[in-house]
């Protein structure tokens, strides 16, 4: 069975990464290979890392309130680089009214504060397995 590679990134000027690290560790403990970029990554750095690391999923952790702008920029750069098929999830402090906006932009799932780690792991597995099913044509 393939070991999926997940990029966890902190775009923008957030100075807090405890939640992202907790999620990264939980995903690693669940059997995923996790690449964590650290704080204050630009959308360009995130997309470059996704390409270099050949990741299967990108997770953005955003607490700054700039989630729509930062996610839009990452998605635009992914399309420009031809990696728009990589699923993207977003976690952080996301107002409920912004969730449909992110989903309409192409984000697969949005996780707010207090989401159980088990739910994140379950959703990530489902997203990745859905991609494998589509790729294999089944």
Image: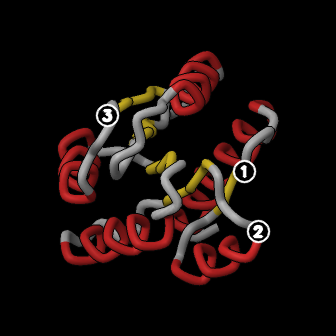
Residue at image coords 33%, 65%: 74
Dot placed on the residue nearer the N-terminal end, 1 or 2: 2
Q: CA distance from mark 1 to mark 2?
A: 9 Å
Q: Position of residue 134 (x, y in %)?
A: 57, 68
C-beta proximity under 8 Å, tags 3 and 1: no
Q: Secondary structure at mark 2?
A: helix
Q: Which residue is mark 1?
A: 112
Q: Earlier in the sequence, mark 3 or mark 1?
A: 3
Q: Contact, CB < 8 Å: mark 1 with mark 2?
A: yes
Q: CA distance from mark 3 to mark 1?
A: 20 Å
To which residue does mark 2 refer?
A: 96
Question: What residue appears at the point 19 percent right and 69 percent down from the top-left corner?
Answer: 81
* Residue at figure coordinates x 34%, y 47% from the top left: 13
Q: Is residue 134 above or below residue 47?
A: below
Instruction: Give the SS element for disc 3.
Output: loop
Could you say where residue 96 lies in the image, as x and y percent from the top left? 76, 68
53 relative position to 105: left or right: left
Q: Which residue is mark 3?
A: 37
Q: Residues within 10 Å of mark 1 (few under 14, many from 20)?
A: some
């Amino acid at each position: 069975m393939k070991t999926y590679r997940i990029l966890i990134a902190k775009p923008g000027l957030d100075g807090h990464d405890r939640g992202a690290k907790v999620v990264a560790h939980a995903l690693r403990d669940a059997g995923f290979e996790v690449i964590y970029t650290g704080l204050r990554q630009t959308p360009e750095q995130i997309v470059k890392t996704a390409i270099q690391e050949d990741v299967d999923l990108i997770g953005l952790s955003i607490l700054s309130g700039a989630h729509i702008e930062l996610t839009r920029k990452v998605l635009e750069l992914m399309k420009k680089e031809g990696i728009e098929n990589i699923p993207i999830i977003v976690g952080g402090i996301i107002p409920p009214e912004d969730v449909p906006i992110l989903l309409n932009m192409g984000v697969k799932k949005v996780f707010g504060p207090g989401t159980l780690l088990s739910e994140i792991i379950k959703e990530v597995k489902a997203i990745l397995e859905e991609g494998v099913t589509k790729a294999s044509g089944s």
